Amino acid sequence: MGVAKTAEAVARRSYGKLIAFLAARTRDVAGAEDALSEAFAAALVEWPASGIPRAPEAWLLTVARRKLIDAARRRQTGDEAVGTVALLADELSAAADDEREIPDERLRLMFACAHPAIDAGVRAPLILQAVLGFDAATIASAFLVAPATMGQRLVRAKSRIRQAAIPFRVPERAELAERLDAVLEAIYAIYAEGWSDPVGTHARSRGLAEEAIWLGRLVVSLLPQEPEALGLLSLMLHAEARREARRDEQGEFIPLDRQDLARWDAALIDEAEALLLRASRMSAAERFQIEAAVQSAHAARRLTGRTDWVGIVQLYDTLLGLTGSIVVAINRAVAIGMAHGTAEGLAALNALQGDARLAEYQPYWAARAALLADTGSADEAAEAYRRAIGLESDPAVRGFLQDQLAEITFS
Amino acid sequence: MKYLLLQYGNETAMMNLPKEEASQMHGAYMAYTEAMKKAGAYVGNSGLRPTSDATTVRAPGGKVSVLNGPFAETKEQLGGYYLIEAPDLDAALAWAKRHPGAPHGSIEVRPVWA
């Protein structure tokens, strides 16, 4: 492997680990990022001349530490500088031992990024940047935010970690469940951004789904006894297993009930099922486990040829009780329509009217349109399809909805 | 790290507490302060007299005016503060959660400029 390739491979594998370790003591994520990027730049200059070091990670850590100490010296004067420099120098000598494994503190870093003192909307972007090294422009395009705005939010969040002294710590047992939830939410938000672009027209979005699964695996490996972490990974793997089947060769959208089961990824489904089973043995099911169970019920069609809609309704009942989420309520209404008939599904959907958020929520209008079309209310269905089409951003899904609309208006 | 815990609440409601509840509240504050001292987190604290006793000085563009009343008329008023020493935000938040004023309003946690 060439020097540039090795540096790239180390960067990919080690980025978050090195940032976590460098920032854990000082809580200075931005400083750690600067120092590490300087270290990578130094590697590209020095490695071709002197050869790739035996322990590239330790080499990078040592150089980055020196850069941090230099920066601290430049920035500060007086007692504070002495303290910081001493703290860094202490660990610098320890890290000089090449053979020593660098402790994995990425989970602590994630808990800092998803701390309740950090604005919920910036937690997922912050994890993408600090743990995976995504730049602000890439994150901005994935989350549909102006790059300058995203850059500013990230800078502010990092400053907050430092100035308010948000700890790099896996919370105590009593707080763990609630705080882990925020970490899992952030990872799921990353996955959702990647999922909305199933064909990977935008390479970055495709990457996001994979990165989210990677983070999910990381959390599971570090907290193997947390059922919700297993549940989230299971949920993401189930969804991922159907990625290919969501589009035909022309890139047209294929809804779940029309997907070719042979195109589902059996290995991913098996892994997802095993994770869910493991989780179910640990405790009463919570949000991510139940969502994974819904996906598991859909996946069972591969074996049984049918979908247990009554069971899915029950899962959504529980989920709605736990979350009170409008998204869950819509999915539940659709499932009721499948299990108990269109009229009941429509009644469940009508019960949600009055929620102002629905005016901008595509899945509500798409669900409503499909149910209305089934009851033969063509005019109302067409109206709902037009709302759904107007709210959709994915061209493939928009095309699918337009086809559905054409079917009812010309039949 | 030093943090300032600022207690906000409805001062009218607080001043009109029935005698028994007021003395219970007083006891709770005493115990809280004591626990803070024992834990080595205490730096200082004070309760504030109500905003009806407040006077605000403004000097926009150097033109000084003295106004009778608080900085802003709000539903919840600043009622007092604790200055604490804590290793990190989680430790400061743990003290904020125990604050006897927390159930009656909110506790703002502000890192103090180092």
Image (spheres, coloured by chain):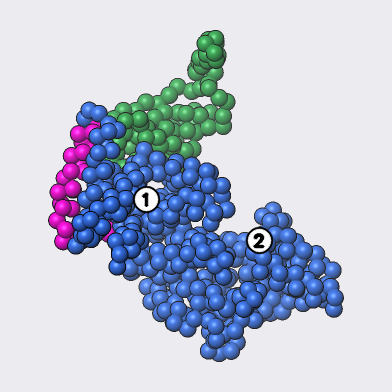
Chain colours: A blue, B green
- Above or below — where is A204 with respect to A157? below
Q: Position of residue A89 (x, y in %)?
A: 18, 43
Question: Which stretch did the figure color magenta?
Answer: A80-106
Near-viewer residue (A350 or A238): A238
Q: Residues within 10 Å of mark 2 (few under 14, many from 20)?
A: few
Describe residue A56's horizontal placement relative to residue A252 as left or right. left
Q: Residue at x 35, y 30 (%)?
A: B113
Near-viewer residue (A275 or A190): A190
Q: Amino acid at mark 1?
A: Ala
Q: Which residue position is annotated with label 1?
A: A112
Could you tell me which secondary element the residue under label 2 belongs to? loop
Q: Position of residue A369 (x, y in %)?
A: 75, 69
- Above or below — where is A83 with respect to A352? above
Describe residue A165's horizontal placement relative to residue A47 as left or right. right
Q: What chain is tagged by disc 1?
A: A
Query: Which quarter of the rendered picture does the N terminus of chain A lie within?
Result: bottom left
Could you tell me which secondary element the residue under label 1 belongs to? helix
Helix, strand or loop: magenta stretch:
helix
